[in-house]
Image (cartoon, rainbow, N blue to C red):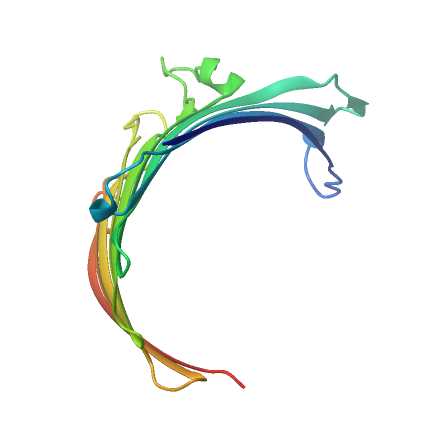
Amino acid sequence: MRLNLSGQYFHRIASYDEDIITAQSPRLVNQDWNIDDLNVRITFRPKLPVCMGTLALVTQYDFVHTSIDSQWFLDSATLAELQSGAIKQHVISESLNWNPLPRFFLQASFSYVLNQTDTPANNIDLVPQTSPTVVNFRNDYWTVTSGIGYIINNKTDFYADYYFYCANDYYKNAVVAMPYGMGATENAVSATITRQLSKNTRLSLKYGFFDYRDTTSGGHNNYRAHSLFSSLQVRF
């Protein structure tokens, strides 16, 4: 059994000087992004019986905080720099890799993201409305992916995977502004077979099915699609 623990932190500052000659006052002249990123990663490889192959589990947590400071130009004067936004993001992810047989493997991963952007505009109510037109923005979602692979023989491989995405951030405030926020689900499945025709030639054939449902657009962007893709690779 092997257990590894690692962590990382970094701080980054990005400055953007604006030069919007044709814009009307007030106009943005400078913006600073201060980003703090902390992540912790745990890797676990349990000792399995030989007949069960090998297994690896990876758990990771990320926290990212971004503060945005902006400076504006108004009436021939440059105003003091103020915080115009703050972004907080939490990401929890888990992945699994299992090789029960030398020719066969399974992969699976899960991630959950909590993301919110706060701005001073959330505290402004435009008369006669009693709620803000620009609310704090959420971008929370979760995903699941899985895949299996099998080496049929020394020239033929098979791989299949599944993907799921879900976001429930649609905020219906049509009384005061255009509704924003992603509200959608997506399912995707595909299967690929690859054949080594010769030493320098490789042929692959892939089929995919996609199902997407979108709440933000009122269902107008919903779709179901089938795809068939083939490629021939020749190395010289």
Asked if one can make out residue 211 in the rendered structure from this viewpoint, the answer is yes
In the picture, measured across the screen, residue 180 lies left or right of residue 220, that is: right
Q: Nearer the viewer, residue 106 or 75?
A: 106
In the picture, measured across the screen, residue 220 lies left or right of residue 119, that is: left
In the rendered image, residue 207, in percent from the top left (x then y), is placed at 23, 68
Q: Relative to 218, does residue 116 appear above or below in the rendering? A: above
Asked if one can make out residue 181 in the rendered structure from this viewpoint, the answer is no
Point 26% across, 41% down: residue: 184
Q: Nearer the viewer, residue 58 or 118?
A: 58
In the rendered image, residue 165, in percent from the top left (x then y), is placed at 27, 42
Point 37% across, 15% down: residue: 131
Point 43% across, 22% down: residue: 136
Looking at the rendered structure, the number of numbered marks drawn on it comes to 0
Q: Relative to 94, does residue 220 appear above or below in the rendering? A: below
The quarter of the rendered structure image containing the N terminus is top left
Q: Nearer the viewer, residue 69 or 218?
A: 69
In the rendered image, residue 167, in percent from the top left (x then y), is placed at 29, 35
The quarter of the rendered structure image containing the C terminus is bottom right
Q: Relative to 138, does residue 182 appear above or below in the rendering? A: below
Q: Relative to 167, does residue 117 appear above or below in the rendering? A: above
Point 22% across, 45% down: residue: 52
Q: Nearer the viewer, residue 217 or 94?
A: 94
Residue 103 is drawn in which quadrant? bottom left
Q: Residue lying farthest right? A: 76
